[in-house]
Amino acid sequence: MKTVLTGITTTGTPHLGNYVGAIKPAIEKSKTGDYRSFFFLADLHALIKCWDPKQIAQSTKEIAATWLALGLDTDKAVFYRQSDIPEIPELTWLLTCMCAKGLMNRSHAYKALVQENTENGENDPDKGITMGLFSYPILMTADILMFNADEVPVGKDQIQHLEMARDIAGRFNHHFGNKFKMPQTVVSEDQAILPGLDGRKMSKSYDNTIPLWLPEKQFRKHIMKIITNSLEPGEPKDPNDSHVFDIYKAFATKEQTEQFRQAYLDGISWGAAKQELFELINKELSEPRERYNELIQQPELIEKELLKGAERARQFSAPFLQKLKKAVGIRKIT
Ligand code: TRP
């Protein structure tokens, strides 16, 4: 049986992009029964970009409640908090010692920050860059290799990190014997393209997200804020050049999408198009929203689920790490 694994960094409030791009497809996959599933809250990763303890704790709670409210079956999928698995940071060190510094130098995320510093005329091209950020892909590699993941569904921006994971795994295998499987990247179409309010990829870094669990009225208000062009009601509109349409498509059946396309050609007003979008998404989210609100009021239930997941995950990670340590020469004196 193949293993699917993915994590979400706990720095913000869950939004439609997380839902469509990561959580929904992951839950669907875990339901097929064809996979061993590992889904986790990447709270150690969160420390890289967020030094606000309250925000980290709040985001971890919200993202955990989101997976549960959306119907993740935690008896099937292993659902855990990264920081509850001490084997992950330990493995990170073993891998750090197998990772060429040059490989990290080539990271897009790191290079973008260096370029920004250079463009801003900074003397130090590494200004503001921590070692956590620099070696971020190694921690991510440990997440993946710890559970011998076959498939890792991620957004396009993470493809390079998966290549690095394979590179590091290959080097470890070469030196210490074949211990790790080579993880495959799985990028779904929707994942890459859900636009935010301004049309750029929906992402907390762009501040253009639509939060998943807003009360209905506020949710509708956000949808109404998605930017459009200034075509009048009655004028035909191009579905292939509309963020409202792109988001609609990510939630709709084929038939609904076709009907919506026709409505565009028939000149639906932007107000009406957004109202349809709101109704479509709201229908899908209204029940989970109630479950979410209940869960948020019962943090002890969320905590219990996470501890259960950690225990299950460690049944695998603890013996595996022992094996890896032994392989590198960290063993009992005999
Ligand atoms: N880096 C990923 C992101 O920001 C989150 C993440 C951390 C992850 N570890 C992972 C995703 C392991 C997949 C597998 O989106």
Image (cartoon, rainbow, N blue to C red):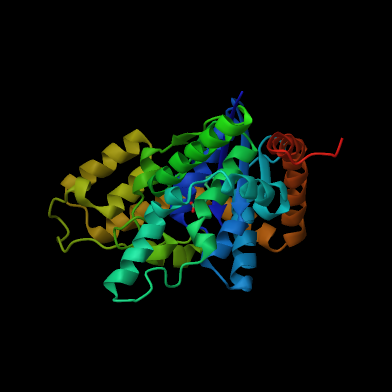
Question: Quarter holding the N terminus?
Answer: top right
Q: Is residue 232 above or below residue 52?
A: above
Residue 275 image offset from top left, x and y in percent? 34, 57
Q: Residue at x 23, y 61 (%)?
A: 228
Residue 202 image offset from top left, x and y in percent? 38, 57
Q: Residue at x 56, y 61 (%)?
A: 46
Residue 66 image offset from top left, x and y in percent? 59, 53
Q: Is residue 129 left or right of residue 228?
A: right
Q: As rendered, which of 97 and 185 lies closer to the eye?
A: 97
Residue 143 image offset from top left, x and y in percent? 60, 45
Q: As rendered, which of 160 and 154 lies closer to the eye?
A: 160
In the image, farthest residue toward the right: 334
Q: Is residue 186 above or below residue 220?
A: above
Q: Residue at x 36, y 52 (%)?
A: 277
Q: Residue at x 35, y 76 (%)?
A: 123
Q: Is residue 57 left or right of residue 136?
A: right
Q: Is residue 218 visible?
A: yes
Question: Quarter holding the C terminus?
Answer: top right
Q: Is residue 12 visible?
A: no
